[in-house]
Image: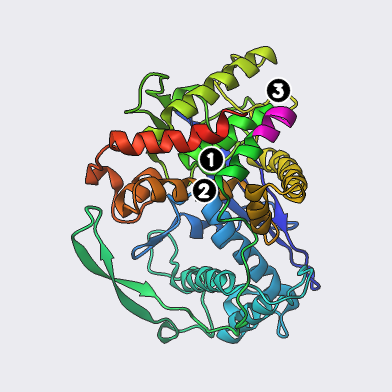
């Protein structure tokens, strides 16, 4: 996969990044390269993504996390300080804390170049930007030449006492032991809006809405139906879904409730052009909730039949989601096609609400404030487990493949009871039989 992002500034400097993919032992690995326009060598800033500063490192983080929570902020920051600051620089060694604060204030207020709506950013977004830029600036001051004590950048205005660390308690992987760690404090405190923004995605979609979405998908875009099921009944993220292939599906059987899981321990090569379809955020074996196993199996079988009908089964990679060109589908393509289904869902729900359908009326109120995204289905799955398991926190985190409360494999989470399985199956089949 190659990915290019850049923002051209007034002064003429232009920083951008490329994501390079390379297969190693049938697993896809990526490397991040920052470039400066008109220069043909990888910029030293690229080393930031492979270094470790104390406990902080981005080396093994998911690619989507690095791009959306670090890299895009850093590229905008570089283009701003070299081009659009009140006191633009020609050398990173002239960077000051005032420029860091100037950038973050402009980001928070939505007044950076290429900000389209000119509105205040959400508080969470500003906090993420502050975190990313603080660590990047600290790296610039901290970084040494290989095998020497010589600083790579001789910063004129940044000193060691500009950086403060706080002590936090970090829990061990077993969930019980803990230790104290030092974490970098934010370099500056940008101005932020006190307004609370409503979510842009639906986080409380009901079973009626899920059933309707599946029904619409089967009629309009059957290739996505199994993906919707994986989101709603297994809690898989978009990156997990477009990375799905037959070899990841383990223990799934129509007469078996226990033991099914998805092997999401690695990013796979699913295309001959080595383009990445998506990235798995939390690499682990994801168990299938026992009450959802038979439903997932049913839709999996339907999906295989559909692929055979379209003469897309089998393929050399075992990929399950194929685009119009016969290639394994990327997350961007999946999202575009999902958006088309979401628009139809909104239309259908409004029509049925006008006819007096009580479930549609309730769902219309939810959809009127936000749109359904692939991640909305993950929220639905969480609500389903919460309801069936009476809010059991460990089970929720276990089946959601969360990293919190330690590594979930260590907990030996008990299987669902027959009563819980029956409740889950009754809940699902009541809505899906019609589709």
Task: Indicate left or right for 257 with 220 as reference.
Answer: left
Among all residues in the image, which is located at the extreme front? Answer: 356
Q: Position of residue 286 (x, y in %)?
A: 39, 38
Corner quadrant of residue 433 = top right
Question: Disc 3 or 2, which lies upstream in sequence?
Answer: 3
The residue under the point 58% across, 34% down is 227
How many residues crowd around disc 1 within 10 Å: few (fewer than 14), some, or many (20 or more)? Answer: many
Task: Indicate left or right for 418 with 201 as reference.
Answer: left
Question: Disc 1 or 2, which lies upstream in sequence?
Answer: 1
Task: Describe the element under mark 1 as helix, strand or loop.
Answer: helix
Above/below status of 431 relative to 282: above
Question: Disc 3 or 1, which lies upstream in sequence?
Answer: 1
Q: Position of residue 118 (x, y in %)?
A: 77, 75
| Cα separation between marks 3 and 1 | 23 Å
* Magenta-colored span: 215-221
Q: Position of residue 164 (x, y in %)?
A: 39, 82
| Cα separation between marks 3 and 2 | 31 Å
**Which residue is at the front of the view, 376 or 313?**
376
How many residues crowd around disc 3 within 10 Å: few (fewer than 14), some, or many (20 or more)? Answer: few
The residue under the point 44% across, 34% down is 426
Q: Which disc is residue 326 wearing? A: 3
How many residues crowd around disc 2 within 10 Å: few (fewer than 14), some, or many (20 or more)? Answer: many
The residue to which callout 1 is attached is 231
Q: Which disc is residue 380 wearing? A: 2
Q: Position of residue 213 (x, y in %)?
A: 65, 39
């Amino acid at each position: 996969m190659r990915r290019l992002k850049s923002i051209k500034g007034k002064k003429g400097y232009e920083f951008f990044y490329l994501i390079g993919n390379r297969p190693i032992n049938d697993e896809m690995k990526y490397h991040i390269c920052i470039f400066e326009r008109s220069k043909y060598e990888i910029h030293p800033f690229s080393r930031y993504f492979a270094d470790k500063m104390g406990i902080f490192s981005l080396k093994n983080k998911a690619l989507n996390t690095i791009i959306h929570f670090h890299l895009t902020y850093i590229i905008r920051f570089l283009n701003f300080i070299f081009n659009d600051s009140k006191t633009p620089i020609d050398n990173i060694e002239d960077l000051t804390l005032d420029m860091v604060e100037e950038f973050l204030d402009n980001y928070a207020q939505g007044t950076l170049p290429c900000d389209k709506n000119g509105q205040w950013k959400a508080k969470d977004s500003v906090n993420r930007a502050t975190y990313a830029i603080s660590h990047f600036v600290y790296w610039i001051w901290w970084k040494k030449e290989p095998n020497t004590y010589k600083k790579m950048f001789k910063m004129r205005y940044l000193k060691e006492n500009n950086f403060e660390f706080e002590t936090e308690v970090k829990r061990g992987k077993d969930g019980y032991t803990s230790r104290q760690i030092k974490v970098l404090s934010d370099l500056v405190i940008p101005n932020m809006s006190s307004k609370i923004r409503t979510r842009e995605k639906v986080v409380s979609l009901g079973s009626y809405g899920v059933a309707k979405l599946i029904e619409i998908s089967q009629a309009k875009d059957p290739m996505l139906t199994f993906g919707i099921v994986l989101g709603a009944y297994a809690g898989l993220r978009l990156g997990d879904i477009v990375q799905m292939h037959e070899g990841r599906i383990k223990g799934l059987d129509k007469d078996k409730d226990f033991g099914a899981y998805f092997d999401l321990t690695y990013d796979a090569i699913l295309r001959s052009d080595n383009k990445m379809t998506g990235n798995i955020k939390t690499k682990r074996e994801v168990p299938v909730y026992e009450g959802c196993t038979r439903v997932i199996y049913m839709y999996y079988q339907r999906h295989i039949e559909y692929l055979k009908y379209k003469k897309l089964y089998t393929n050399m990679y075992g990929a399950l989601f194929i685009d119009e060109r016969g290639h394994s589908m990327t997350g961007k393509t999946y999202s575009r096609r999902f958006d088309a289904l979401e628009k139809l869902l909104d239309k259908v729900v409004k029509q049925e609400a006008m006819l007096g359908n009580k479930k549609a009326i309730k769902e219309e109120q939810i959809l009127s404030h936000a749109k359904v995204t692939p991640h909305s289905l993950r929220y639905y799955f969480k609500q389903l487990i919460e309801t069936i398991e009476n809010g059991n926190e460990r089970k929720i985190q276990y089946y959601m493949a969360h990293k919190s409360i330690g590594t979930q494999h260590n907990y030996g989470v008990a299987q669902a009871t027959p009563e819980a399985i029956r409740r889950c199956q009754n809940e699902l089949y009541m809505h899906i039989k019609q589709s």
